[in-house]
């Protein structure tokens, strides 16, 4: 699960606690402050309530714990400005920021801080604030987390004549929960799309080198545990450059797509296929019969190029060269790729649709 989704789920848990339990308001504000120190890079967090022309530390966590109940002037403080302007304020370096009370920030150890206003209707009634002893400590994700929790607090806090009074939190947070769940699902979908973009070849839809590398590591671990055996095959298209130069890149791209489709026909759906270069492809396939099985798969791959490719109105006789190697316990991923690649070049130098295994031609 991504860090963003983990944060959203923790926030959802806070909302569910609000819906299902009777909370002492002070206790609940304390829970929010504690969560903020867990969910962000904050050293300390506080909920400050507006009391006349002062801001009161009503709940604190982390390094701000010794300062519960202190009062700071609304005017001349970032918290007060946040309430006045009704917008999120981020001081990346308090010692270089004229908006803050520098003496007060030094006292509480706040070198950077974020203030998010808490609203009752359209009135700002307090702030949710995090601080850090480091400058530039907070990210956009941290600010987003503050915003989400401020939605839960603002309305109910604004209704308190005395924020120490015990209340039953009955506000309708269901819509917020639905929004949070929808956001989690949206981000899951986005993560899946990003993985597709980073691990897939755009032209053929096959794995790219990175995607292949991520998966072959799992194959190697599985083979070690289960004493299974797989082979790695390196292929390229013979005379592909001439095809590109003669018929153009559009035809060349269609040839690569057709080559990818023919490779798929030669192996199982569960096997790995990747495009790792212009016309270079790598296959990993589980084997039953060691070297004999390796050669059988290689022959199925070369057989796919025995018939010409029908590309637009063209009949293109294409061929491949296949280099193969068997996995062994002492081989790394780079060893497998290098051995298969070297064998492929041996096969390529000895004709068309030729196969080489571990530096030896297969007759």
Image (cartoon, rainbow, N blue to C red):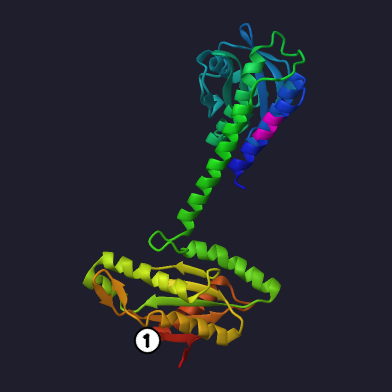
The stretch in magenta equals: 11-16
Residue drawn at the location 53% of the way across and 29% of the way down: 92
Image location (x, y in percent) of residue 77: 57, 16
Please give the count of numbered marks on the rendered protein: 1
- Quadrant in the picture for residue 3: top right
Question: Which residue is denoted by mark 1 in the rendering?
Answer: 349
Residue located farthest toward the left when viewing the structure as drawn: 246
Foreground residue among 169 and 161: 169
Image location (x, y in percent) of residue 146: 60, 29
- Quadrant in the picture for residue 27: top right
- Is residue 41 located in the magenta-colored stretch of the structure? no
Residue drawn at the location 39% of the way across and 76% of the way down: 236
Image location (x, y in percent) of residue 89: 53, 23
Element class at badge 1: loop
- Determine the main secondary structure of the stretch shown in magenta: helix
Q: Is residue 188 left or right of residue 161?
A: left
Residue located farthest toward the bottom when viewing the structure as drawn: 363
Is residue 220 depicted above or below 32 in this figure? Answer: below
Q: Can see residue 244?
A: yes
- Is residue 13 located in the magenta-colored stretch of the structure? yes
Q: Can see residue 279?
A: no
Rate crowding at label 1 as few (under 14), some (14 to 19) or many (20 or more) other CA atoms within 10 Å: few
Is residue 150 depicted above or below 12 in this figure? Answer: above
Foreground residue among 164 and 354: 354
């Amino acid at each position: 699960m991504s860090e963003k989704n983990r944060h959203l789920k923790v926030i959802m848990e806070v909302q569910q606690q609000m819906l299902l339990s009777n909370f002492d308001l002070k206790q609940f504000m304390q829970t929010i402050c504690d969560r903020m120190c867990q969910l962000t890079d904050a050293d300390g967090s506080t909920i400050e309530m507006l009391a006349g022309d002062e801001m009161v530390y009503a709940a604190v966590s982390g390094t701000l714990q010794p300062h519960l109940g202190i009062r700071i002037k609304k005017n001349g403080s970032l918290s007060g400005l946040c309430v006045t302007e009704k917008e999120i304020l981020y001081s990346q370096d308090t010692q270089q920021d004229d908006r803050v009370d520098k003496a007060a920030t030094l006292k509480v150890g706040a070198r950077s801080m974020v203030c998010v206003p808490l609203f009752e209707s359209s009135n700002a009634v307090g702030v949710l604030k995090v601080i850090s002893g480091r400058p530039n400590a907070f990210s956009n994700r941290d600010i987003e987390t503050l915003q989400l929790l401020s939605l839960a607090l603002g309305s109910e806090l604004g209704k308190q004549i005395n924020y120490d009074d015990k209340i039953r939190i009955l506000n309708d947070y269901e819509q917020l929960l639905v929004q949070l769940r929808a956001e989690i699902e949206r981000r899951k979908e986005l993560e899946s799309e990003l993985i597709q973009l980073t691990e897939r070849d755009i032209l053929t839809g096959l794995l790219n080198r990175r995607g292949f590398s991520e998966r072959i590591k799992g194959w190697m671990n599985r083979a070690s545990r289960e004493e299974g055996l797989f082979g790695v095959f390196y292929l390229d298209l013979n005379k592909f450059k001439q095809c590109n130069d003669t018929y153009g890149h559009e035809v060349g791209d269609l040839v690569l797509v057709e080559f990818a489709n023919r490779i798929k026909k030669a192996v199982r759906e569960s096997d790995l296929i990747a495009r790792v270069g212009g016309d270079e492809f790598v296959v990993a396939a589980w084997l039953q019969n060691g070297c004999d099985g390796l050669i059988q798969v290689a022959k199925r791959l070369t057989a796919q190029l025995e018939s010409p490719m029908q590309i637009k109105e063209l009949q293109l006789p294409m061929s491949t060269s296949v280099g193969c190697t068997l996995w062994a316990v002492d081989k790394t991923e780079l060893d497998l790729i290098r051995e298969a690649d070297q064998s492929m070049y041996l096969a390529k130098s000895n004709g068309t649709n030729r196969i080489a295994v571990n530096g030896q031609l297969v007759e």
